[in-house]
Image (cartoon, rainbow, N blue to C red):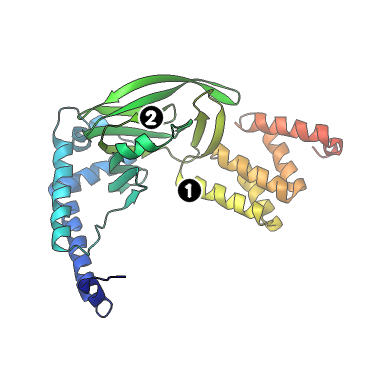
Amino acid sequence: MYIRPELQALRGDDTPQRLAQARQNALIADWRAGPIMANVEAELAHFAAGTPLDELSLLSDLFTAGEGAARRLVDELIGLVSAGLCADPLGQVPLQHFTDDFITSLMLARCGDAALSLEAIDGAVLARRAAPVSASFSPSETYEHVLAGSAEIERVRIASLRPGGANLAFETVQLDEGNVSYRSGASEALVLRRAPRSLVTLKLQRRAGMGAVTREYRLSDGELLHQAAGNPHDSLLELTSALLGRMGRKDAAPLLASMAEETGSQSLRWQALRECLGLDAAAGFAALCKLATRADDPLAAPAGALRAQLIEKYPQLAEIS
């Protein structure tokens, strides 16, 4: 394998690499401290706290059709990053990023549950992918400003809920450069259908707080396929509960029972209850009975139904319910 001389030299002395990275870090730090980005980040903190977008002048300008603020912000960043990489090609841009060859995103700023990011979608990769069969509805607010490219999307809306699923409404929409859109992710999702080239958007998102749930529905008939906690903290606790169950940690049953009886994410509480039942049937059934008798608890109905099913299958449980 051929290794370029400059890379080979770093094996003996990585000082050039460290200096290059320091310059990249300073470049982005100066950009963040500049008059535009510093104020944008200050407003992002207010947005994360619940302030409406139209009360935040700089952020709202970024998501106003016909305004050039979004393009100026991104052009300035891309110019700085490009110049920095030309000068220090071995440096890494110190911005959180992600790519899977289809979607590439660059996090420009984040505060709490709010984030401002730049996203690019590869239309050629989209054309080779199988058509999606489901759509996910996440508890978040999203503003998007198309900076370059175009795409045909399908706007999927939850018209009404029904047991085990939802009645979905569909609308085909054309996205073009300059378009600005807003959606509430709990009731509306976007499905990409076609993009002639790349689609580049500036995106502002605000996730819902604790207790929110993300749901995935099949597009063909609206059947509920999956649901999970809608924020990273609750998702982590769900995964932890499932892991404890798979490990057979019976000593964790009291903790899982307490989690099920607390207020908060319905998805998390139900997951904890399921794992508790699997680890310690007595503790899990006791927690199930408590939930079933709470008239104001949203889990009371499903808990009552599950209790009735268990008693029908195991009549002896009626004595301890």
Q: Earlier in the sequence, mark 2 or mark 1?
A: 2
Nearest the viewer among 143 and 5 is: 5
Figure check: 208 above or below 176: below
Pointer 2 residue: 190
* Residue 29: image location, x then y, percent: 20, 57
Q: In which quarter of the view is residue 225 placed?
A: top right
Q: Residues within 10 Å of mark 2 (few under 14, many from 20)?
A: some
Query: Which quadrant would the C terminus be assigned to in this image?
Result: top right
Q: Position of residue 140 (x, y in %)?
A: 40, 35
155 w.r.t. 87: above or below: above
- Which numbered dot is residue 172? none
Classify residue 273 as left or right of residue 8: right
Q: Nearer the viewer, residue 185 or 259?
A: 185
Q: Residue placed farthest to the bottom in the image?
A: 12
Provide the secondary structure element on which disc 1 rests: helix
* Rendering quarter of residue 75: top left
Would residue 166 be visible to someone looking at this image?
Answer: yes
The picture places residue 231, in percent across and down from the top left corner, at 46, 43
Viewer can see residue 293 = no
Whether 1 is drawn above or below 86: the answer is below
On the image, which quarter does residue 16 sit in?
bottom left
| Residue closer to the observer: 228 or 301 | 228
Q: Position of residue 307 (x, y in %)?
A: 74, 34
Report, in whole angstroms, how far the alpha carbon at label 2 lies from the one at label 1: 25 Å
**Residue at image x 71%, y 56%?**
250
The residue lying at 24 percent from left, 71 percent from top is: 7
Q: Is residue 224 left or right of residue 23?
A: right
Q: Which residue is mark 1?
A: 233
Amino acid type shown at disc 2: Leu
Tag 1: residue type?
Answer: His
Give the crowd class for mark 1: few <14, some 14-19, many >=20 residues within 10 Å: few
